[in-house]
Structures are given as structure tokens and as C-alpha cells.
Amino acid sequence: MQIIKKKILLEDYISREESTWGTPKWELDSNFNSFNINVFISQDMDDIGIATDLDFIPNPDASFLFDPKSPSTRHPGQVNSDLFFPGLSLSAYTEERLDLVKSYDLVQRYKPLFDMDNSLAYDYQGNQYTSITRVITNLNQMPITYIDGGDINETINTSNPNPQLGLFFKSYSGTTRTVNSEVFGIYDTPLTKIYYKGQGFNETNSSLSALTKEEYLFGITTTPTVFSDVFIDRGRTTVLQSHMQLGEIVNVRDLLNYGNGYYKIQK
């Protein structure tokens, strides 16, 4: 254990108003009960590194009785797809992202169905789709609905949004919600709701294998990348230094003056 001592300048916490001059702020504010101190935390041990996935070989003599209350428990005969679980539609409060769909139009900054981004993308299963970022509806920003990374072919019910791809937002102008933060205290922020569908457990984030640590991978945190194709462009000049020097000399005077007497000329 290490004891860290910090000095706090109380001047920042003393009132300098005329009526309460010299009174500590914790006496004026009943909610003031602590100080915020930044502590730098470091560690000097190596990362344990990446693990190697080895095939899971079940014991053929083991018996198992499936328990529906524990569907994720590994048992003999189980395959990776048994661990898959479909994603759920989720909603939450968040910060507004109107900058994503703000255009340069001075009259109508948030233009419905105007694509701020339109590009080809792939979902987690490798299916290609056209990804869009656009305003869907704008009822004088009460609310304004917009999507980031959605599917251009998907029709979204703004009253009951259930997007299959991308992040769907509802932002309300002039309407706020109260946030109680341990860092910033209690404050109001513009109301924005977010709707999206989680990926759940699938072949991209689930693995049925035995995690094994190999000694030569201790401390290695990423898979090594090998670049086997190396191209070196040497230009038109040769790599031999003497030839490059002689290429700059066109007469005897240049030969004498080159490099402030680099060549020793015997007359």
C-alpha cells in the first residue's frame, strides 16, 4: 500500500462575496461534502498477453443433463452456435448528436431525407448494405428524428422505433431532463432518446474453445502482422555513392571544387 498526500488550496473554496466574505463554501452549500482530487494510477507489470484458442475436445465418457436455467454452461456435444443469442432492441437517454445531420443550408439546417453520409457497409454477419446518416422527420425539432449508420432500405416507424441497423435518435428542442452526476452534480441537459438493436452473441464475438497461454506470447497483446510484399523504388540513379557523385560533375573545374576538395587531384 502507498500513501499519497495532496495539498489543496482552500482559496478556491472560500467565498469572496461581500455578504459572505471568508465563509467556506461547505458551510454555505449543504450539498458540498467532498473534494475532487486527481490521482495518477500506474502499474509496472507486463500485460499477460493474448491467449491461444484450442479446439474444445469433450470427454466422451462424461454425462450431462441440460439445465434450461444455465443455457451457457459448456457440456459435451455442445457446438459454438449453441451459445448464440439474438440481439434485443434497446432504448436509453443520451446526448444529442445533431452535428451528424447538420447541413450547410442557412434556411433549413436539418433537411429530412437528405443524406449526410451514404456509403456501402457490412453488418456483423458480412451482409452488405447502404449505410446512411440523415434526418428522417423534423417537426420543428419537437422532436427531430435522425439515424446514424442505418439501412437505406429500412422503413422506421418513428412512433415506435425498432431499427435493425444503426442508431436512431429523437431530440427535443426546449425539453430537458435532469442528470445527477457524481462529478458535475445535478444539472439539466437537452432531452434525447436513442434506439438501437444489440448484436447479442454470434459468431463474431463468441468462441467455444479452451484458452491456453503459450510462453512465447506472454506480454504480446496483439496478433503479429506480417507484410510479405516489400517494394523499394530506387529511382533512376544508382545506389553506388561514387556514381552519384560523378553524375554531378561535368568538367574538370567541378571535379576540383566538388565537396571543397573531396577528390585529391594529382597534377
Image (cartoon, helix red, strand yellow):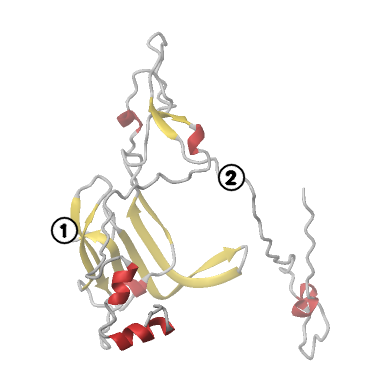
Tell me residue 39's x, y (percent).
69, 61
Give the residue pinned by disc 2.
46
Asked where in the image residue 24 lies, by quadrant, the reply is bottom right
Asked where in the image residue 241 lies, by quadrant, the reply is bottom left
Q: Secondary structure at mark 2?
A: loop
Tell me residue 3's x, y (percent).
79, 54
Residue 144 can be seen, yes or no: no
The C terminus: image quadrant: bottom left
Residue lying at 82% horizontally and 80% vertically, measured from the top left: 23
Asked where in the image residue 263 lies, by quadrant, the reply is bottom left
Residue 113 can be seen, yes or no: yes
Residue lying at 34% horizontally and 22% vertically, measured from the top left: 78
Query: Quick check: 120 left or right of 241?
Result: left
**Among all residues in the image, which is located at the extreme bottom?**
18
Give, as a three-letter code, the residue at label 1.
Answer: Asn
Q: Circle 2: is it few (<14), some (14-19), or many (20+) Cα within 10 Å? A: few
Give the residue pinned by disc 1.
153
